Amino acid sequence: MKYPLRLLSLAVLGALLTSRLLAGDSQAPELLAGHPRFSYEGVENIGEMEEALRKSLVAHERYSFSRSWWQWDRLRARFVDGGRKDRNALRILRAVLRGLILDWYAKAEAKGEGDMFYIFFTTNSGNKVARKAEDGRTLKRDFHGGGYHGGWGGASRMRIYEELSRQKMLTAAEEKLFRKIVHQSLDPRFLDFKKGAQSANNHSYGNGGGVALALKLFPDAPQAEAARAWLDRIWASLSGFGDWKEWTYYPYGPIFLHGLLDVAEATGRIESDSVLLNALGRRALAFIHGGGVRGNPNSGAPVRVDQSAVYADPWNVGYYNVETSSRDGNFWYRLAQHYKDPEYLWAAEQVALGGRSPGGAASPEYLDAYRRRFGWFIERDIKPKQPTGNATVGFLSPLKHKIPERIYLNSGLGADKPFAAFFLYEEKSGHLDNVAGYLYEYSFNGAKLLHTSGKYNNVYSGDSLKGGGTGEESLDLLLALHRRHPYPLHPDRKGDQRDFMRRGSIRHLAGLARAENNKAGDSFGQYGYEHYYGKGSRWIRQAVLTAEGCLVIADEYVPGNQLGEDYQAGPVWHLAPEAGVAAGTSERNWFDAPALDRAWWQKEAIRVLLLFHDDGVLQYGSLKQAQSQDTDPNVTIFGFRPIKARRPERFLSVLVPHGPASSSDRVAAGIKTAITDSGVFTASISGVKVRIGDGAWSVRR
C-alpha cells in the first residue's frame, strides 16, 4: 500500500510522538490535572499545558469516541457563552482536537491503518468490541472509531473543530487533514445510511447530530445526498408521530434530546419546527419536580451523597449519581438558551444542582455554583421560573395522537410538595419492558418514598433472564400469580412454567384515565387495563395524594375466566431496606421504612409507613431479592389472597410519611380503613378522611 509523502510525514510524526510519550509522560503531572477545568484564564504556562495535554491524549491506547467527548464540548460552550474571552480554553480545545483526531490519525497511519480511522459511526457488521472493514480487517472500537455508538460524540467533535477553525487556531495543513478525515468517515466503507436506526431514537439522533453538522460544514462530503435523506427520514419519523417512542430517561433520554437539538440546529429546524421541539421539551419537563429527588420509569436516579464535587465542577458533575446527569442538565441549559425560556432554566437548575430548599434558600456554595454554571442567563437577567404544577394526564405525542402516557399527582412543584407519578402506556421499547400500570415515583418534602425500575425486567436471551431485573414483582403494581409459585416470585424467569403475564397482552383503557385536583391541594388519579393477567381480566387503580403527603391507593381487579380459582393476587410495593430488619412473613398488616433517598437540603430522616387494609384473609410479608440494575436496593412488600374468576377483588393500600419523632406504632394506630361490598374505599389518617368510590373522591378534614 502506498501513501502520499505528506501522510508518511504525519505517520512518522505520530510514531515519534507515541514513542516519546510512552518513554515518559511523568514530566509535569500538574499540567494534566483536572481537565477540563472551569477556567484557564489564570494559567501562565498555557503553552506547556497545551502540549502536555495533547501528548497525553494521543498516548492513550484507546479513548471513547462517544461519551468522553461531551465534557470537551461543554468546555467549548463555556468559552463561547463566556464571550470567547478565555483564550487559554481555546488552546486546550486545540490540544484535544489535535491529540484525539489529528495525531490519533497519524498514530493509525504509523500502523498502516490510517484508512481505517473514522470519527462518526459505522454500520459495518460486528459487535461492541470490533467490526469488520470492507477488506476483512478489524475495526477496533475506541481506536479506529467508536463503533455504532461512536457517533454520540460526533457533534461535539464537529463543534470544537468549527470553533477552532473560526478562531484561526489550526494550520492550513491541519484544516486540510481534518477535511480528509471527515470525508473518509462518511465514505460508504463505513456507513450505509439505509442500515441502522431509521426512526427516532437515541441511536439515530445520537449519531445524527455529528453527521448533520458535518454536512453543514462540508456540504460536498461523500454520500451527502444519502446522509441528508437519512436525516430527513429520522426527522419524518419524529414529526410524523409527533414524538419519540423510547421512554427510558436515564441514561438514554439526554442522548436522544441532545441529538435532537444537534440535528435541529444543523438543519435549520430549531426555529422552523419550534412548535414540535417545545412540545417534546414540555413533555420531558413534566418528568421533573422541585423536590430534589427523582424517579424514572426505567432507572434509578440517586442523589449524590456528597454535593461538594457538584459545587466544585457544576458543568461536569451532575446532582444525580447517574451516567448522564451532567449531560441532562446541559440539555435543559441548551433548550433554555435557544428559546430564552425560564421554565427550561428551572429544569436545568433542578438537574444540575438539585433545586433550592423550600422558600428558595440555598447555601453559599450552591449559589456560587449556580453563578458559575448559569452565568449566561444571569448576564441576560433570565431567572428560573417554576412551572405551574397540578394533577394531570401526561400525553405521548401531545400535538397529534394524544396518547395517555403518565399520570402525575401533585398540586404544585415546590420543594416541599408531595408528588406521585404512574406510567400508563402499554407498548414497550427495547429498553423499557412490561412497566405499564405501575407507580414509578412517590415523594414528599425532599424524600423519595417509593421508586422501582422496569429496565431489563422480563427481558430474555432464549430462556435466560438477562440484565439486573428480577421479574414483574419488581414493580409497584397489582400482581396475580398461580398458587404453585411462592408469592410474589413471578415465574418470568428461567426454568419454570410461565403464567399469564402483563407483557404484550394488556390493553390500556385510555378512556378511564383521569387526574384532577380539589381546592384544598389534594390530587386524584385513575387508570385501568383489560386482559390484565389473563384474557378478560380487568384492573382499575384509583389513587388520592393528600396535601399532607399521604397516598391512598384503591385497586379493583376482576379476574377473567382463565384464572378460575387457581390464582392469588395483591398489591406489591418496594420500600427501602433497613439494617437489622429481617424479611419474611408477617402477622402485621403494616410496614415501616426509611426513605429511599432525600434531597441535599432535607436533613430530617423522613420515613414512610405502608398499611394494607386487613380483610382477615390477606397474607403479608417482605422479600429481599436482586434489584434492577438501575434502581436503589429495596425490599419487596406484599399482601395477597386467593382470587376467583369474575368476582371483584378489592385491595386498599395507605402510605403515610412521618418524621422520626413519630413512632410507627402510633402512626399505624391512627389509620382506619374500610372497603364496602359495593366498592367504596375509605381511609382515615389522623383525622384526614379519604373516600374513593361511585366514580367520585373526596378528602375531608
Image: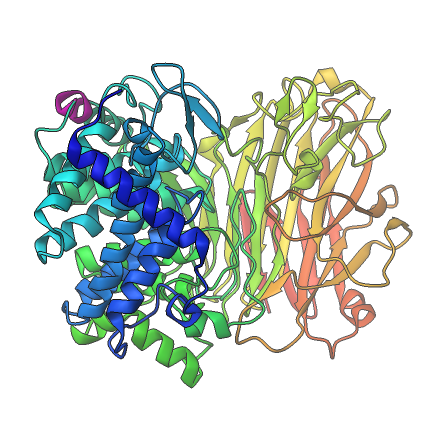
At x 56% / y 51%, what residue is drawn?
Answer: 300
Image-based side of 99 in relation to 322, left or right? left
Residue 691 spot, x, y in % from top left: 62, 54
Residue 551 spot, x, y in % from top left: 62, 57
Image-based side of 468 in relation to 570, left or right? left
- Is 511 in front, or is 112? 112
Is residue 321 in view? yes
- Is 237 in front, or is 504? 237
- 512 in relation to 453, above or below: above
Question: Magenta span has 226?
Answer: yes
The C terminus is located in which quarter?
bottom right
- Is 308 in front, or is 558? 308
Is residue 397 in view? no
- 269 in relation to 530, above or below: below
Number of marks: 0
Residue 567 spot, x, y in % from top left: 80, 26
Magenta residues? 223-229
